[in-house]
Image: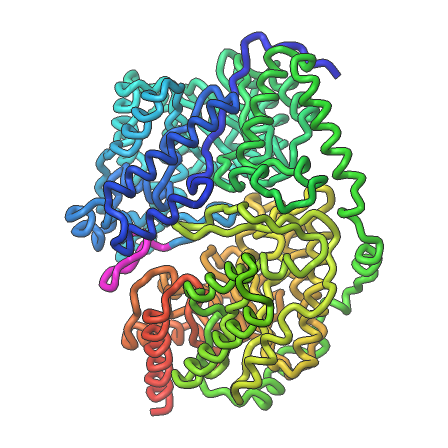
């Protein structure tokens, strides 16, 4: 195949870049500021240095137009709330006293003031801070952050493009502020918000911005006529401004569908569209809408969310087709590169044959630059790059690392009976209550306890050879003994071993399963200063041997109270990994489920009475379009049941979910057929309890009463109030008492105080029920 050169030179660009730095310098600086070891000036200096390094890397890779404004100290949606002046009333005093401390108070809360709610950014594992808006919200422009970063990029001699969350997406992501009328819709504030965006755009133009990108990913979801009309009005208004830069409206993560002609007809100079995965449908949609004659199209043809080397010839074919649909075609990743690690070249511990298969952020920028050059000058100009790319793709396809016939045979033999508990819930709950003998409102935690400096040091010492495996495991047993003793003293009813030996709830299991690859430096931001290293799911999955049994059994030997076996569920094992793209996700999920089923069987055989299989990503991975959801939920819930359905009636199966919009999947939660579910509820004011009640959820549930993503310690009275709210929706005989999520990110002092208050609250409410 030979691609003819484009009529005008194609430019290479990206929508965003990893923020953390090669050694997670941003995390260290922000957490140092919180602890008083880093000054505000030092924090800002570190952030500016990281931005300059990012832009330098992009420029050296051949990126012609760099993003500004995508960098954040915590979250880009929170940054947008600051930019438009949407500061909740409870945080205004803190922001006025010190804008930086007030910013972090909105993100994390203080002992006296609750933070903003946090939830998943569309179907990714990135968490954003949910804007709180009400009828009395007064917007005011504050473009200082955007102007500073634009000036920094211009000073480096670069061509910058400021990136903003678009006004429609911002309002669609928002929730009514506490006290707002029940029928209030944040989108009703659009006409009030648009003048603020107009002022920001005018300021950016005056400061030297030629183009500004407005991100509208919410428009790839199903939108009703009123929402589509709001988008049309918004971009008619902004496009009609005379004092503004050129506007590039961007969407990603899926196809735009009915919103595409709305944006194509808007008086803006360009659109940025995703053409990967399910968003490949944008190509037909763009053609049906008449294309973008005389206007700019930024084509996202490199997958910005996964780490596999792109098929460059296939991408060039797509780009060649797009040349006939727009006045100018430029090349980009499908979305911000925030969702992938920084540099695959740093992974020197991986098999050398695997490295050419991988493209992290730096490698993706090289792919984008190659595609722009090929589109501009023809495929002959990038013949060497295309040959190397073909060799990498062929190597992966032919590698024995990717296929295991025994795994495939076992997965193909699964029957419907393998995904169904042998007894109905009513029989199971009777058997479980007889075995466990728990009190009303039983108390437990989600699984992990604080990952202290001592635990991290022990792992580092083991890696460095300063201690041997026996010495390391003795330190882990010490930590388990401490956790069990604390829980017994505090009065928790169902205990956990605290997971001191686990580096991460997915990576820990991935390192013990065949088919997974683990990275050393593949950090990706999950929220704030929380970074994870998603493993790479490269081949067929099996379990060589037990992964958790000896730790759970050791903990159980220390107490007469039940200790939960703790596993990460198959959907979350996929969602929080970089998954293979050479077979359907449902096939991979079934393989993981069968490996976990073996672990469940071994836990039960060892005497474990309560087994928790966490699925926090079940909602996160829900397709953005309703038409795509039934097929996903069918294989996702089946995978969970394959994992858990083989246990006896008196073995209690728990699951856990957090930081998502659960109302969208209540039926799927029911279909899991878990005996008990614990869910995040503190920041959302027990919303999920009401959603479960409205659905008629028949099993036991523990909506969280302790927000573990804030450093504040909830008092016993506060936790008791939360419990009473939960009791309005869930009967006492089916209500559990627990935190929102695991405690690994918290320190011991706040953990002790919070759990003591949680147990005290449960006892108080039990007494009220007995009175």
How does the figure colour the protein chain or chains? rainbow
Q: Is residue 444 above or below residue 621?
A: below
Q: Nearer the viewer, residue 171 or 465?
A: 465
Q: Is residue 508 above or below residue 121?
A: below
**Residue at (18, 47) in percent of width and height:** 98
Residue 606 percent across, percent down from the top left: 67, 81
| Residue 579 located left or right of residue 296 | right
| Residue 5 located left or right of residue 501 | right
Q: Is residue 712 magenta?
A: no
Q: Quadrant of residue 232?
A: top left
Q: Is residue 662 above or below residue 39?
A: below
Visible in this render: residue 110?
Answer: yes
**Residue at (59, 48) in percent of width and height:** 519
Q: Quadrant of residue 634?
A: bottom right
Which image quarter is the C terminus in? bottom left
Q: Is residue 112 magenta?
A: yes
Residue 439 percent across, percent down from the top left: 46, 87
**Residue at (43, 18) in percent of width and height:** 269
Q: Nearer the viewer, residue 305 or 73?
A: 73
Residue 81 percent across, percent down from the top left: 30, 42
Residue 252 percent across, percent down from the top left: 52, 35
Dominant secondary structure of the residues highlighted in magenta in the image: loop
**Residue at (61, 19) in percent of width and height:** 322
| Residue 412 located left or right of residue 59 | right
**What is the tally of numbered marks visible in this picture?**
0
| Residue 589 located left or right of residue 738 | right
Q: Is residue 248 above or below residue 593?
A: above
| Boundaries of the magenta span | 106-117
């Amino acid at each position: 195949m030979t691609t003819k050169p484009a009529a005008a030179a194609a430019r290479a660009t990206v929508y965003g870049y990893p923020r953390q730095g090669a050694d997670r310098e941003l995390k260290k600086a922000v957490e140092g500021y919180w602890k008083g070891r880093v000054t505000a000036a030092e924090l800002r200096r570190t952030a500016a240095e990281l931005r300059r390094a990012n832009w330098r890397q992009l420029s050296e890779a051949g990126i012609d137009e760099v993003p500004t404004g995508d960098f954040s100290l915590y979250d880009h949606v929170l940054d947008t709330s600051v930019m438009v002046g949407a500061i909740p009333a409870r945080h205004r005093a803190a922001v006025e006293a010190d804008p930086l401390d007030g910013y972090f108070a909105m993100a994390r809360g203080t002992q006296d003031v609750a933070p903003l709610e946090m939830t998943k950014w569309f179907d990714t594992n990135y968490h954003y801070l949910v804007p709180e808006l009400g009828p009395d919200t007064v917007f005011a422009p504050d473009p200082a952050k955007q102007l500073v970063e634009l000036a920094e990029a211009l000073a480096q001699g670069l061509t910058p493009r400021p990136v903003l969350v678009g006004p429609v997406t911002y309002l669609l992501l928002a929730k009514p502020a506490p006290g707002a009328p029940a029928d209030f819709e944040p989108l009703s504030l659009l006409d009030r918000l648009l003048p603020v965006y107009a002022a920001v755009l005018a300021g950016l133009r005056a400061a030297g911005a030629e183009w500004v990108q407005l991100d509208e990913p919410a428009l790839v979801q199903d939108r009703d006529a009123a929402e589509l009309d709001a988008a049309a009005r918004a971009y008619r208004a902004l496009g009609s401004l005379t004092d503004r830069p050129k506007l590039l409206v961007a969407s990603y993560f899926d196809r735009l569908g009915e919103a595409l002609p709305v944006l194509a007809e808007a008086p803006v100079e360009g659109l940025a569209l995703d053409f990967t995965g399910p968003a490949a449908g944008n190509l037909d949609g763009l053609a049906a809408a008449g294309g973008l004659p005389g206007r700019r199209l930024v084509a996202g043809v490199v997958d910005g969310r996964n780490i596999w080397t792109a098929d460059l010839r296939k991408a060039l074919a797509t780009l060649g087709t797009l040349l006939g649909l727009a006045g100018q075609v430029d090349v980009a990743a499908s979305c911000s590169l925030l969702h992938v690690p920084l540099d695959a070249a740093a992974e020197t511990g991986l098999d050398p044959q695997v490295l050419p298969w991988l493209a992290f952020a730096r490698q993706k920028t090289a792919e984008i630059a190659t595609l722009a050059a090929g589109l501009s000058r023809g495929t002959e100009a990038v013949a060497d790059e295309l040959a190397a790319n073909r060799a990498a793709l062929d190597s992966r396809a032919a590698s024995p690392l990717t296929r295991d016939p025994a795994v495939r045979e076992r997965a193909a033999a699964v029957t419907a009976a393998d995904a169904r508990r042998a007894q109905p819930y009513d029989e199971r709950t009777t058997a479980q209550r007889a075995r466990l003998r728990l009190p009303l409102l039983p108390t437990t935690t989600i699984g992990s306890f604080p990952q202290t400096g001592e635990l991290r040091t022990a792992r580092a010492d083991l890696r460095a050879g300063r201690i041997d495996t026996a010495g390391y495991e003795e330190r882990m047993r010490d930590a388990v003994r401490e956790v069990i003793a604390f829980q017994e003293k505090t009065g928790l009813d169902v205990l956990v071993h605290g997971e001191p030996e686990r580096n991460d709830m997915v990576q820990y299991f991935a390192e013990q399963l065949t088919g997974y690859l683990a990275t050393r430096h593949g950090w990706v931001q999950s929220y704030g200063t929380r970074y994870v290293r998603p493993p790479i799911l490269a081949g067929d999955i099996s379990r060589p041997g037990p992964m958790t049994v000896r730790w759970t059994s050791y903990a159980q030997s220390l107490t007469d109270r039940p200790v939960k076996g703790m596993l990460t569920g198959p959907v979350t094992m996929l969602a929080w990994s970089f998954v293979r793209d050479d077979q359907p996700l449902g096939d991979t999920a079934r393989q993981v489920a069968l490996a976990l089923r073996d672990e469940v069987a071994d836990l039960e055989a060892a005497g474990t009475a309560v087994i928790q299989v966490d699925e926090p990503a079940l909602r996160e991975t829900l397709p953005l379009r309703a038409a795509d959801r039934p097929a996903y939920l069918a294989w996702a819930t089946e995978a969970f049941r394959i994992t858990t359905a083989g246990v006896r009636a008196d073995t209690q199966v728990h699951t856990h979910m957090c930081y998502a919009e659960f109302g969208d999947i209540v039926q799927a939660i029911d279909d899991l057929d878990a005996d008990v579910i614990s869910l995040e509820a503190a920041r959302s004011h027990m919303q999920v309890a009401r959603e479960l009640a409205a659905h008629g959820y028949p099993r036991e549930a523990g909506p969280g009463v302790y927000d573990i993503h804030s450093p504040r310690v909830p008092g016993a009275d506060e936790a008791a109030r939360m419990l009473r709210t939960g009791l309005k929706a869930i009967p006492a005989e089916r209500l559990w008492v627990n935190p929102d999520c695991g405690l690994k990110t918290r320190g011991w002092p706040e953990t002790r105080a919070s759990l003591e208050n949680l147990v005290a609250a449960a006892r108080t409410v039990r007494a009220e029920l007995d009175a």
